[in-house]
Structures are given as C-alpha cells and as structure tokens.
C-alpha cells in the first residue's frame, strides 16, 4: 500500500509507489504510479510541446476497456474487475483524466511508458471507484489486470492505429471534403469563363477557369481516395501478439475479441491482424498513410501555388483571380494584400513532407521482432493529419470561398495571347502558323494583323478559325 509523505524540495504531499525496481515518490493526488513518474524524470525531452494529444489518450482508454471486456468474456478476468476497469477507462476515453497523462513523445521506442501510464491511471481510478486508496493495487493491479493479455509491444501499436484512423475519419476527411466541395461549386460556376492556359509558365492554348479548378478538385479527390485506401490496413490491430508476436500469456481468442470491442466502440472496421510478427516489427500501414498524406499535401500545394500566381499583382502580375482581403499585407506598404492562406497551406505541405521522411525512416527501424520508433511515427503522422485538416479548413473559409475571377484581365490576356495561333495548324500548317506568331511577337502587332499580313489567310478566315471558347472545348459540338 502507498504511504503519504512530503517532498522536501517542493513541500507537496507525495505517496510512495513501487514497481520492479523499487520505491518511487509520486504526487499524492495523481493517479499515475511509479513507472509514469520514472518516465517524467528520465524523459523530459521536448516537454510540454510533445505531450500526447487527447486523441492518443482516448485511444489508450479504448484499448484498456476493450482488453478488460474481452478478458471477461473469455473467462480470464473476473466480471467485477472488468467492470471497474471499463468504468475507469471510460473516464479516460471521455477526457476526464487527461491531466493524468503527462508523458512526452520522445521516450522508450515501444511506447511502454505511455502504456504503463494508462495501466497505472486506470488501475488507481478503478480502485478509487472500489473505495480503495491510491496505490493500493487492489482489487485492480496495473499489470496483472489492466494490462492482461497485452504487452506494450502490441498495445501501443493498437493505440497508434486507433488514433490515426479516428483522426483521418473524424478530422481530415470532413475538412478536406469541405474544401473540395467549395472548389467543385466554383468549377461549375466558372465553367464558361475562357482564360489563357499556361505551360512552362508561358502562354498556351485556352482553357476555362472551370476546367482549371476542376483539375484541383480531381487531385484532391485522388489524394483523399489514396488516404482512404490505406485505412484497410490501419484497421488491422496487433492485439493478441503480446511481446514478440507469439501471443504468449494471452487467450488465443483475445485479439479477435478485443478488436471486435474496439470496432463497436469506435464504429470503425477494426479487426485482428493476420500476422502479428509484422504488426510489431514494422508499421507499413502507417507509413502508407503518411505517404498518401504527402500526396494529398502535394495536391493542396499545387492548388495554392496556382491561386497565388493567378492572383499575383494585382496590376503588375497575372491578376486573373481576386483573393479575399483578409488582413493588411505589409507593415510599410499601405493597401497591400498578400496571398497568406496560400502561403500557410504550402508551409503545411512542406511540414507534411518532412514528417513523412521521419515516418518512412522510423519504419525501417524494426530490428528483429520490434520496431522501436513507434512514438515518433505516431506523433509525426498525427501532426500531418491535423495540419492538413486545419489548413484545409482555413483555406476553404478564408480563401476558396472568396475566390473571384477578374473578367477584364482574363479577357485581355486571351485577346493578346499569341498561342491562339495553334488553331491555325490544321488549316495552314505548323510552320506558317509559327511564323505568324513570331512575327506578331517581334513586331508588337496583334495576332490577327500578323496573320493577315502573312497572306496565308483572310481576316474572315482568322475570325472563323480562332475561336477561344471552342479551343477550350475542342470536342464539343458547335
């Protein structure tokens, strides 16, 4: 049983908890125990910036509740203890005990200390519910009961998968989809606005603004589909593997039973993995999710850079799109408006690229039966998900919804473009068409004047063949 005393340095009341290495002073009113306190002491790396977010704490609670209920169903844990653990785990799941999870990302590579943090908090809370003092370890013991049928080596990967899957489904997909839908509406609204296309940053043949925005929508759709596709493997849980993948000390049906509970609790399609050894020694499913996020971020960066260039100027640049005037853009130049939402989302993309490099490297560190970079994989992947979700929401609200075409500027650029000459190729050939375009460019004349001066066609033929609106939709009937 724990004994209360005072920490001389802080004059705060403490109690003594014990683990396999001996006695440890723990703040008297905290639910965590000896192993959590040791981790607080030895791993104050990046604190408090890298403390686990609510999503991870919730996943820890879900894991422990599912394990207790599964063990009770399989007859390896009394129903009384399972009920106490489940009640305590519900406090964790619902966010009532977040302050009891003080550990940082940069700890043991298996996530053992965060797993034990959950075991200790839930055991102490369960014993509180049973009317017992903190540190009693009776009727619920953190290792023997809360951790029953598990190892940190399979438990923490389950937490990783739950947290990532919920983040994708609940945060990423809704926010990115909202941006996608805004852009899809803009694509339809601007379907008939013909503008000059550009390749190599040089003038090209016409397109419509609707087609341009529709391209962004398609990229986002593909990016989201790629992330969705990775969830099939993320739903496979390492439960039942225990320490090295053999399932030692776990009921043979524990993994499937506990996974079914997690599926019911979350409404997601979690299941037991088909190969526990791979689930412990590598995290390919999460690396794939990270890679898919990188691709999605690439699509968002392309979109944002296009908006930034189309809105450049507004008078000395392209200036074909107008962006919302959200805030002053300069501390010295009055009236300047900058494409700040574009800059923010492209910086997020750069961060996601870097996070993916970390995840990819960390996934290689699966020596023998255990990958020991689990916490940093989880941290970087969750950060990427949250950043993309936040940036998509911000860009949608404060840029995409307010995008408007500058019709006069668009019309001017179309009329001045030399690449309209491309429509003459089928009629007078490439060489003669090229000569007309180069002559107009060098002489500073209009394309029409240069065409008529060439003697290869009449003004009437030029007007008949050079139709920008038809060039943008060459396969539609007149």
Image (cartoon, rainbow, N blue to C red):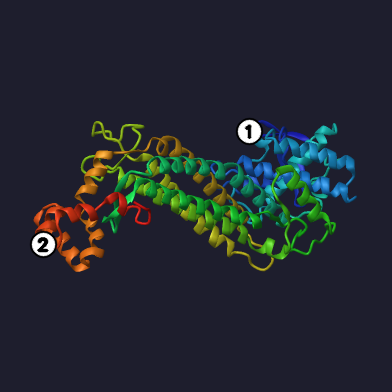
Q: Which mark is residue 81?
A: none
Q: Residue at x 24, y 31 (%)?
A: 334
Q: Is 331 in front, or is 174?
A: 174
Q: Residue at x 58, y 51 (%)?
A: 106
**Residue at mark 2 to residue at mark 1: CA–CA distance:** 95 Å
Count neighbours of disc 1 (C-alpha within 10 A) and say few if under 14, some if 14 to 19, many if 20 or more.
few
Q: Residue at x 31, y 32 (%)?
A: 328
Image quarter for residue 421? Answer: bottom left
Q: Is 431 in front, or is 277?
A: 431
Relative image position of residue 274 (x, y in whole percent): 73, 62
Contact between labelled residues 1 and 2, with CB atoms less than 8 Å apart: no
- The residue beneath circle 2 is 455
Q: Is 185 in front, or is 69?
A: 185
Relative image position of residue 473 (x, y in whole percent): 35, 53
Q: Residue at x 33, y 45 (%)?
A: 308
Of badges 2 and 1, nearer the viewer stands: 2
Q: Is residue 275 left or right of residue 460?
A: right
Relative image position of residue 151 (x, y in whole percent): 75, 55
Q: Which mark is residue 10?
A: 1
At numbered mark 1, what does the secondary structure look like: helix, strand or loop? loop
At numbered mark 2, what does the secondary structure look like: helix, strand or loop? loop
Quarter holding the N terminus is: top right
Question: Can residue 23 be seen at all in this image of the molecule?
Answer: no
Question: Can residue 36 be seen at all in this image of the molecule?
Answer: yes
The vertical placement of 405 against 155, above or below, is: above
Q: Earlier in the sequence, mark 2 or mark 1?
A: 1
Count neighbours of disc 2 (C-alpha within 10 A) and say few if under 14, some if 14 to 19, many if 20 or more.
few
Relative image position of residue 272 (x, y in whole percent): 75, 57
Image quarter for residue 150? Answer: bottom right
The vertical placement of 152 against 399, above or below, is: below
């Amino acid at each position: 049983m724990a004994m209360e005393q005072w920490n001389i340095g802080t004059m705060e009341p403490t109690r003594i908890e014990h683990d396999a290495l001996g006695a440890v002073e723990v703040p008297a009113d905290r639910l965590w125990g000896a192993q959590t306190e040791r981790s607080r002491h030895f791993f104050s790396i990046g604190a408090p910036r890298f403390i686990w977010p609510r999503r991870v704490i919730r996943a820890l609670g879900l894991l422990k509740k599912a394990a207790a209920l599964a063990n009770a169903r399989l007859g390896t844990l009394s129903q009384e203890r399972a009920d106490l653990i489940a009640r305590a785990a519900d406090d964790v799941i619902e966010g009532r005990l977040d302050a009891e999870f003080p550990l940082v990302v940069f700890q043991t590579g298996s996530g053992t200390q965060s797993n034990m943090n959950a075991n200790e908090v839930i055991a102490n809370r369960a014993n509180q519910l049973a009317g017992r003092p903190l540190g009693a370890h009776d009727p619920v013991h953190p290792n023997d009961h809360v951790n029953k049928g598990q190892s940190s080596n399979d438990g923490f990967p389950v937490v990783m998968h739950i947290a990532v899957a919920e983040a994708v489904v609940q945060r990423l997909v809704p926010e990115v989809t909202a941006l996608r839908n805004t852009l899809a509406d803009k694509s339809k609204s601007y379907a008939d606005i013909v503008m000059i296309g550009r390749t190599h940053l040089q003038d090209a043949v016409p397109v419509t603004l609707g087609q341009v925005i529709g391209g962004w929508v398609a990229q986002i759709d593909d990016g989201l589909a790629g992330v969705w596709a990775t969830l099939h493997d993320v739903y496979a849980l390492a439960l039942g593997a225990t320490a090295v993948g053999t399932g030692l000390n776990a009921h043979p049906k524990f993994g499937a039973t506990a996974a079914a509970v997690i599926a019911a609790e979350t409404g997601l399609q979690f299941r037991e993995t088909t190969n526990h050894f791979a689930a412990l020694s590598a995290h390919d499913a999460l690396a794939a999710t990270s890679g898919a996020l990188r691709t999605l971020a690439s699509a968002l960066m392309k979109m944002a850079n296009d908006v930034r260039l189309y809105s450049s100027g507004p008078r000395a640049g392209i200036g074909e799109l107008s962006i919302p005037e959200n805030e002053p853009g300069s501390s010295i130049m009055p009236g300047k408006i900058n494409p700040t939402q574009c800059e923010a989302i492209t910086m997020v993309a750069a961060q996601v690229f870097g996070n993916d490099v970390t995840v990819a490297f960390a996934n290689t560190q699966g020596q023998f039966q255990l990958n020991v970079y689990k916490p940093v994989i989880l941290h970087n992947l969750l950060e990427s998900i949250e950043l993309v979700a936040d940036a998509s929401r911000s860009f949608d609200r404060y840029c995409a919804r307010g995008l408007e075409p500058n019709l006069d500027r668009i019309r001017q650029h179309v009329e001045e473009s030399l690449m309209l000459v491309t429509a003459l190729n089928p009629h007078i050939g490439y060489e003669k068409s090229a000569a007309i375009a180069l002559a107009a460019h060098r002489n500073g004349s209009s394309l029409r004047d240069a065409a008529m001066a060439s003697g290869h066609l009449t003004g009437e033929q030029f007007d008949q063949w050079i139709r920008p609106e038809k060039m943008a939709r060459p396969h539609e009937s007149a």
